[in-house]
Structure formats: C-alpha cells, structure tokens
Amino acid sequence: MKFCGNCAAPLGNRCSQCGFENPAQFKFCGECGKALRSVPATGPLPAGLKRSLHDIRIASEDTVADVPVDGERKTVTALFADIKGSMELMEGLDPEQARAIVDPALHLMIDSVRRYGGYIAQSTGDGVFALFGAPIAYEDHARRALYAALRMQQENRAYSARLRAAGSPPIEIRIGVNTGEVVVRSIRIGDQHTEYSSIGHSTSLAARMQALAPTGSIAIAEATQRLAAGYFEVKPLGLTRVKGVSEPINVYEVIGLGPLRTRLQISAQRGLSRFVGRHHEMEQLRRALTLAHEGRGQIVAVMAEAGVGKSRLFHEFKLLSQSECVVMEGFSVSYGRASPYLPLIELFKR
Ligand SMILES: Nc1ncnc2c1ncn2[C@@H]1O[C@H](COP(=O)(O)OP(=O)(O)OP(=O)(O)O)[C@@H](O)[C@H]1O
Ligand SMILES: [Mg+2]
C-alpha cells in the first residue's frame, strides 16, 4: 500500500542505502538489511509553508518532515471563524482603536487552532479559515477542530467580559465546521508567499455553516456531527436550506463537551463484544492489586500495537476490581502535547 487507509498519510519506506521500497511497517530493509527510518521522507517544502508549519510544531514536532504538499486528496475538517458584525463594530472607531479591539480576538482564534494542531490557511483580518488533518494528517481531525472551536468561544467570552468592563462593545464570534474530502494544494503567490489551502464542496459548506451559526455559537454539518457523536454535546438546529446545496441539510450546534472521552467508551456505548482470553494479563493485574491491598503500591504499564486491546483490558480489570477500591482515571490525548499535565488535571477534576 502507498497510503495509510486510516489517515491517508503516504507510507513510503525507501531504504537510504539501496533505494528498495519497503512495506511501511518494516524496521529494516528487506533488500540489504539496513535500519530504516520510521518517518518516511518526502520532497522539500516551499519556504512559506515550512515557516508556518514551524509555528505549529508544538502539536506535531515529529511529523513535520512528513508533510505532502501538492494536489493531494484528503479527508479534513475545515473551520471558519468570524467576528460578527465587525463592520458595524468598527464604524465610528479610529483604525487604531479598531485594531486594539479586534486583534486580541483574532489572536485567540489563532492560538486555539494551533493548540489543537490545526493549520491557519487564511486569516481575513476579522476571522480565520483553518484546516485540521492537513497538511499534517490526524486521525481525530474533527474532534480537534471542535475542541479548538469550543476553546475560541470560551476564550472570547472571557475577552468580551473584559471589553465590557472597560466600556467597549463585546465581540461575538460565529464558527462553522465541516468534514469531508477535499484536495489540498499549495498555490504560489509571488516569490515570498505560498498559500496552502483546500478546495472542495465540504470546505465551502463549512463556510456556509459559519454564516448561519447563531451568534456566539458553533454550527456543524452532519459529517462532523457523526464523527463527534459522544465526544461533544450537540443540539440539532433542524433541516436547513443552504445556498449552493440542492437539498436541505441537517445542521447542529455544538454546546459543549460530551460525557465520553475515549474510543473504547464510544464503542462500549454501542455494546462491546464478549471479552475473550487475556487470562495471563488479567492474572498479572490481579496480582499487582493484591500486593497494593497489602500496602505495597504497584505500577503496571501495558504496551502493545494499536488496537490490540489495551484499553479493553483495563476496562475489564476495572469491572472486576472497582468494588474493592476507589478508581480514578486520567487520559492523555493526541492533541494534549501542549499541556503535559492534562492527564493529571483530568484526574483531579474527576
Ligand atoms: N480480549 C478481547 N475480547 C474481545 N474484544 C476485545 C478484546 N480486546 C480488545 N477487544 C476489542 O477490540 C477493540 C479494540 O480494543 P482496544 O480499544 O482496547 O484497543 P487498544 O489497544 O486500546 O487500541 P488503541 O491503541 O487504539 O488505544 C475494542 O472494540 C475491544 O472491545
Ligand atoms: Mg486504547
């Protein structure tokens, strides 16, 4: 295979010694035995893109080398955020005054996007257009976009409260999000500037969601809603006619975080398959618990390839042992690299 079936990242694994094209999972070259780099290399990036990718390093340090650039088909989540009525707001204000009010709002939008590994494709002066899932592929791009959107609204509410206290009118943001297949590509605009952006119906629909979002809210179309189900609390806004779309579509408003945090919790809600095997691992966990009960605290780490059942093992162990002890849980998340204490914060909050 040339591309990942999960996130569409290219899976090249060429040996630097003999040039042999190895399957993605190979650690050593099948032709000459040389150790292979785990991150596949791709062609050089245009200067402008390299610079802006550098800016989002926090969330993506180890994947920057892996960024494809030209005309690539991908599933991404697009986010449009815009200050409502910015023209009316600026009417009668000196440009410097307008800037002092608008810029902090713009910055909090940009910061929120970066925090969750998104890419600012465009900043319009009173809003942003951001991509999640490109140029850097993330499996959870829809969730990242919605976390960023929620953070924007939350930060903006705090900012508006400060504005009000200072006697200025508050700023309100409308956000639209949609997920779908697009072609992402970079367009060279002069020598200094390269724009990297997506084209496709789903991106235009994200912009439409923003236009119809109630003030201060986040509107999403169905594709994003399906991916976000369980992780976020949403309110249906009903079937809506959207300019440029022949049939009315279902629109939802994102209200806040939902009760579920992990993939396993989502599948548990749909009903888990019968738990099989894992007697040995279960026995090890029980033994550690017995020792802990005797006053000798234990730490158990479970390591395995993706999807082989680590979370499920813990889930089953919890079911067996939670009547005997207090269970506290914390999670780390893929977009949480900017806040290393996230698992602890979550644990304390619970
Ligand atoms: N022993 C088992 N018996 C039955 N089903 C299982 C077992 N182990 C795992 N599964 C099922 O396989 C799926 C993947 O398991 P799980 O989510 O625990 O994997 P994971 O190792 O935590 O994956 P990831 O690395 O993506 O976090 C789940 O639907 C889970 O219910
Ligand atoms: Mg897991």
Image: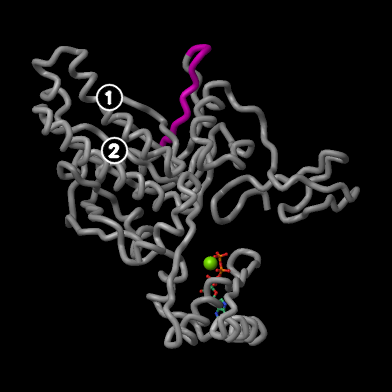
- Local crowd at mark 1 within 10 Å, few (<14), some, or many (≥20)? some
Expressed as whole percent of the image width and height from the top left, the position of residue 258 reads: 30, 62
Residue 243 seen from this side? no
Amino acid type at circle 2 is: Ala
Expressed as whole percent of the image width and height from the top left, the position of residue 285 reads: 60, 81
Where does ligand 1 appear, by image quarter? bottom right
Expressed as whole percent of the image width and height from the top left, the position of residue 259 reads: 32, 66
Residue on which the image places disc 1: 103
Amino acid type at circle 1 is: Asp
CA distance separating discs 1 and 2: 21 Å
Secondary structure found at label 1: helix
Confirm if mark 1 falls within 8 A of ligand 1. Answer: no
**Vertical order, 179 against 232 (above or below):** above
Q: Quadrant of residue 16?
A: top right
Quadrant (top left/top right/bottom left/bottom right) for the C terminus: bottom left
- Which callout, 1 or 2, points at the residue further toward the start of the chain? 1
Q: Is residue 34 left or right of residue 124?
A: right
Residue on which the image places disc 2: 207
Q: Is residue 287 magenta?
A: no
Most extreme residue toward the front is 295
Q: Residue at x 77, y 43 (%)?
A: 14
Of residue 52 and residue 57, the one placed in the foreground of this image is 57
State the extent of the magenta-drawn residues as a range: 190-199
Q: Name the disc covering residue 35, or none.
A: none
Q: Is residue 195 magenta?
A: yes
